[in-house]
Amino acid sequence: MAIPTNHERLVIFGQSQNNKLAPALTRAALRHAWQSLYRHLTKLELSGIPFSLDHVFRDTLQALESAARRLAKKYITDVTHHSSSGATTPPPALNPILKPLLAANFLPLPSDPPTIVLTQPFSDALEAAQQ
C-alpha cells in the first residue's frame, strides 16, 4: 500500500505537512466541496444533469457563507445575551475561523441592530462564482 502524498493526506485526513491538522477553514471548505461534488456527480449519474465544476465551486462558497452566517448570528445572540445579563466577564469573541469570510459589526447606538458583513475578497469570490 502506497503512502499518501501531502495533497492526498490533506484531502482525506485534513492533515497538512508533519501530520498536523490543516487550518479549520481549509478543512471546512474541503468538507463542503466534497459534499457538493458528490451531489453534482449523483445528479449526473441518476438524472443525466450535466456536470459543471463551476457549480461545485459556487455551491461550496454558498455553503461556507451559510455556515459562517449561522456562526455569526449565534455570536451576536451570545454577545447580546451577555451584555443584557450584566455579566462581569468579557463578552464572547467571534470565532477566528470567520475572519476571512465576514465580520459582525455592533453599531454605536444600542437601538441599531448588529450587522453581518462579508469581507471584500469573499464577497468578490461569491459574486464571480455566481456568474
Image (cartoon, rainbow, N blue to C red):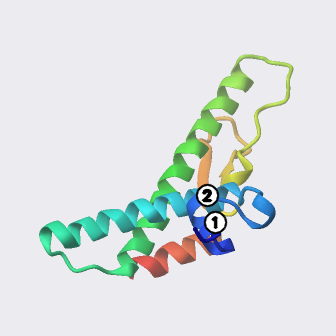
Q: Where is residue 51 drawn, in percent x and y?
A: 28, 79
Q: Residue at x 81, y 63 (%)?
A: 18
Give the left or right position of residue 92, taking residue 24 as reference.
Answer: right
**Residue kind at label 2, given as amino acid type:** Phe
Please indicate, yes or no, whether residue 102 appears anywhere in the rendered image. Answer: no
Residue 35 percent location from the top left of the image: 41, 59
Compared with 52, 104 (above or below) is: above
Q: Is residue 101 left or right of residue 87?
A: left
For mark 1, does the 10 Å Cα neighbourhood hold few (<14), some (14 to 19), or many (20 or more) residues? many
Image quadrant assignment for residue 111: top right
**Most foreground residue, 120 or 51:** 51
Q: Secondary structure at mark 1?
A: helix
Say above or below: 110 vs 65. above
Q: Is residue 41 visible?
A: yes
What residue would you read off at disc 1?
A: 10
Q: Quadrant of the N terminus?
A: bottom right
**Which residue is depicted at the point 14% across and 75% down?**
48
Q: Residues within 10 Å of mark 2 (few under 14, many from 20)?
A: some
- Determine which of the numbered discs, if any, sits on residue 13 in the image: 2
Q: Are marks 2 and 1 in contact (CB under 8 Å)?
A: yes
The residue closer to the viewer here, 17 or 31, is 17
Q: How many marks?
A: 2
